[in-house]
Amino acid sequence: MKTRFAPSPTGPLHLGHGFSACTAAEMAEAAGGTFLLRIEDIDQSRARPEWEALIYEDLAWLGLAWPTPVMRQSERQAAYDAALDRLWSDGLLYPCTCTRRDIAEATRAPQEGAPLLGPDGVIYPGTCRGRCRKGPRPLGAVLRLDMAAAVARCTPEALRFVETGAGLAGEQGEITLAPQGLVDRVGDVVLCRRDMATSYHLSVVVDDAAQEITHVVRGRDLFEATAIHVVLQALLRLQVPVYHHHRLIRDAVGKRLAKRDDARALSAYRDAGLSVSEVRALWSDPQG
């Protein structure tokens, strides 16, 4: 078994991050496997060296260890370009010039009703879907995946994954993705952003395959995104790992923790004198 924890150095790790990292590490250890750390720093406008340094400090304080050097996404653009080139040459990507305002206005049209939400927010209405896809892949452009064309390339056997945690509705075992459901409830997601020449969905799939991750351990809030990742794995002919989506750590009123909630930062608890065992106890008692 090979698991990983892949934080972004855009703020301090909070209790939920600690829980996720320890869950992944403990699963690997119990199976005699390997736990990896990966730094997801593709958003260079927000990534900071001091936050990356704090990630190492926090995880070491929790007692975790990992092989070095760690993989850093900012050093892997060539791998993402190769994946994008392949999808473009297969006719599965198209350039999109829509702004967020354009999409919001299109989905607010009276005949459309309330906008549908997918793993990436409002489902794209397909405004640019008919744009030219011939010639070299356009650089510096936003590229979307034509989900209908994508699922048409996938066999039913490819649109499956195994869940050993629990999905949003408690799903476990082998889960089959319905092609039309992917079109209607996921839509044409962005795989290449103008500001970073890739996207989270593309990068995470390419990197998990490169590191031969066998079990992806992450929060339940990413369960729906797994559908996108399985489609990309099928299109790029990558191995589909087992997925384990764990419960989320929430605050006293049930709100999911976020990096902006610095009061729940692991470093804040450490600075306050709490021990690792006391922090672990907070995972089951967030009001503490």
Image (cartoon, rainbow, N blue to C red):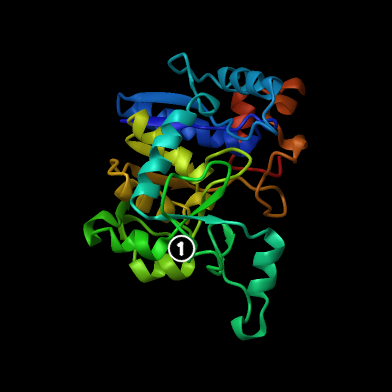
Residue at coordinates 71% horizontally, 44% vertically from top-left? 287
In which quadrant of the rendered image does the N terminus lie? top left
**How many numbered marks, from 0 up?**
1
229 on left or right of 157: right
Using the rendered image of the protein, determine whether residue 225 is visible from the camera's viewpoint: yes
49 on left or right of 142: right
Q: How crowded is mark 1: few (under 14 residues within 10 Å), some or many (20 or more)?
A: few
- Give x and y (percent) for residue 3: 39, 31
Q: Residue 136 falls in which quadrant of the image? A: top left
- Give x and y (percent) for residue 140: 58, 42
Residue at coordinates 63% horizontally, 73% vertically from top-left? 107
Q: Indicate the secondary structure of the residue bearing disc 1.
A: loop
Q: Which amino acid does label 1 sit on?
A: Ala
- Location of residue 93 with respect to 46 vertically, above or below: below
In which quadrant of the rendered image does the C terminus lie? top right
- Give x and y (percent) for residue 200: 52, 42
- Location of residue 170 with respect to 268 vertically, above or below: below
Residue at coordinates 66% horizontally, 21% vertically from top-left? 54
Write down the residue under mark 1. Answer: 169
- Give x and y (percent) for residue 67: 43, 15
